[in-house]
Image: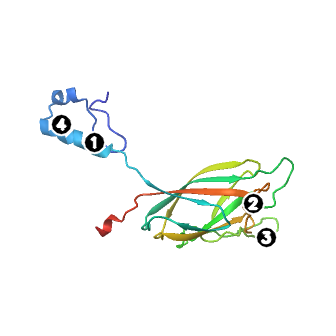
Amino acid sequence: MKTLTDEHPMSGIWLLPKHNLLEKGLTKMNIIIIFFCQTFFLKKSYMAILHYRITEKEQSVVIPNTIHAQSFIFRRAVIRMKPLTAGSSSTNCKGGVVISPSHFSGFEISSGTSINSNTGKPITNNLGANDILIGLDEYKPINNTYFDMEFESEDINQAFTVRVYNFDKEPVVFGTNAGELTSIDLYFQFASLYDYKTY
């Protein structure tokens, strides 16, 4: 049980056993305020999730409503594929996929080039300003990867397009043969479906 010297690390609100409140010389009004603050500050806040599934190298996506501009966090990618057999090499994904969603229209990711210290030549990464890079094990049927990438996104329209490339920025193949993709599920977390500033 919390005592007078204990403090909640997030809210800074004193947490007191109810039977000890009056013993500490607090009035009934103090008790009401303290318990109101505990209820208000310790209440869980829930976030909204944007999820869509990609099954083509160029996928049109339609969501129920526009999402207004706000903090936007890329949380999870689930990639299903027909795995490669032992001893075979990758010719489709070549180690991973590059996702280019058109709803990233404000250059959320700035990707440059580096210099090879041995040759002195630039190392190009083929990534655009709005590309998400996802590595995968092509010998597994499912790759489930978690992320914590936060963007300051612009408004996301109800309809947008997502393109998928391999690590060499070549179009990938979705299909049923070994090494081909089946589907990609992306999960983004954001604060709210509604723009409360307009109310």
Q: Residues within 10 Å of mark 2 (few under 14, many from 20)?
A: many
Tell me how far mark 4 sits from mark 1, CA to CA.
12 Å
What residue sits right under mark 1 in the picture? 39
At 77% from the left and 48% from the top, the residue drawn is 139
Tell me how far mark 3 sits from mark 2, CA to CA.
28 Å
Disc with the residue nearer the chain's start (3 vs 2) = 2
In percent of width and height, residue 35 lies at: 23, 39
Tell me how far mark 4 sits from mark 3, CA to CA.
70 Å
Mark closer to the observer (4, 1) = 1
* Left or right: residue 37 compared with residue 80: left
Tell me how far mark 1 sits from mark 2, CA to CA.
50 Å
Badge count: 4
Mark closer to the observer (1, 3) = 1
Which element type, helix, strand or loop, lies under badge 1?
helix
Marks 4 and 1: CB-CB under 8 Å?
no
What residue sits right under mark 2 in the picture? 93
What residue sits right under mark 4 in the picture? 31
In percent of width and height, residue 89 lies at: 84, 55
Tell me how far mark 1 sits from mark 3, CA to CA.
61 Å
Q: Considering depth in this image, is 191 or 50 the residue closer to the camera? A: 50
Three-letter amino acid code of the residue under disc 2 = Cys
Three-letter amino acid code of the residue under disc 4 = Ile
* Left or right: residue 58 compared with residue 121: left
At 66% from the left and 57% from the top, the residue drawn is 183
What residue sits right under mark 3 in the picture? 120
In percent of width and height, residue 78 lies at: 62, 52
Q: Residue furthest right?
A: 87
